[in-house]
Amino acid sequence: MGKLRFLVSLMTNENDYQLEQAHSAELAAKKLGVDLEILYAENDAITQSTQLLRSIQVEPKERPDAIVFEPVGSTALPQVAQAAVNAGIGWALLNRDAAYLHEFRLKAKSPIFGVSSDQVEVGRIAGRQCAALLPGGGAILYIQGPSHSDVSRERESGMNQAKPSNIHVSVLKGQWTEESARKAVASWLNLSTSHKAKIDLVLAQNDAMAIGARKALAEVANEVERDRWMSLPFLGCDGVPKTGQAWVRSGLLRATIITPPNAGVAMEMLAEALLHKKPQPARAFIESASLPSIDSLRPTK
């Protein structure tokens, strides 16, 4: 086998975690000595499907040896995955489960598997962070990702499992971007119900949305209300070194959850399977961790 060619398909280049995914892929390509192409789907599932099919439905010598794929939409593109498997292209699914992984593995001649953080556990860590910061209970403003996202639903499920029953939740929806959260919170502030809500903590399902929420609340006209909002803990997730972790160190965020990028891990697994015929598990999980630790978030006595 000659030099491997990998294609990495990511959701958007306007999200710090997706950019970290791209960086991890670039580092892995350099380490493995493979050719790499990265495509961004502009947060559009149809665009992503079209991009991938275009790369699969070419002359065999022009096809990638494997595709690493983080889906935009509510499905993990089973028909596209089938086309890749039929063409003998390896397939690694990021941050999503899909029934077809197990089905296609029974007949596929190329490697097919998933790599993910345990998103339910990520949500549980967020719930434990809230419990540590609000030992007497309270109310949180919770900015979620899009409704169609498995990651969003699983993080919500884990958070609700871990948070105490005396912590109440008001939910807003974002699109994983800073601007989407800023707009969602700004619209919520215009509702009469927002003025009646006594929020004790702001939690977002990623760091970008946490900062977007903070920016919206920093624009509150009433100085007393604005100061109160700015005094609250803001929590995020993803923990990219240059953004989430830096925002925790600077005090813009009280805490985040480090969910390491996994595109590079998937590429290394694909290389092991393609070059050395090493079997890979149907799903591999990457461990996440609170930053700072849960214990350090508890009030000192």
Image: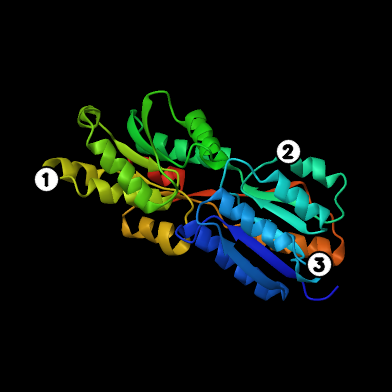
Q: State the separation of the CA atoms marked 1 and 3.
A: 64 Å
Q: Mark 2: which secondary structure? A: helix
Quadrant position of residue 106: top right
Question: Residue placed farthest to the left in the image?
Answer: 223
Q: Is residue 213 left or right of residue 196?
A: right
* Residue toward you, 231 or 61: 61
Q: Residues within 10 Å of mark 3 (few under 14, many from 20)?
A: few
Q: Position of residue 195 (x, y in %)?
A: 20, 31
Which comes before the other along the chain, label 1 or label 3?
A: 3
x and y percent of residue 68 in the render?
67, 58
Residue nearest the observer in this picture, 292 or 60: 60
Q: Tag on residue 249?
A: none
Can you give x and y, in whole percent of width and height, for residue 255 in the image?
Answer: 40, 49
How many marks overall?
A: 3
Q: As displayed, is residue 30 above or below residue 191?
A: below
Mark 1 highlights which residue?
A: 223
Q: Give the residue number, with chain letter if any, for mark 2.
A: 99
Q: What residue type is labelled 1?
A: Glu
Q: In the rendered view of the protein, which quadrant contains the C terminus?
A: top left
Mark 1 nearby-residue class (10 Å; few <14, some 14–19, many ≥20): few
Q: Disc 2 residue type?
A: Ala
Query: In the rendered structure, which disc, 2 or 3, sits on the residue that comes first in sequence?
Result: 3
Cα distance in 3D space between marks 1 and 2: 52 Å
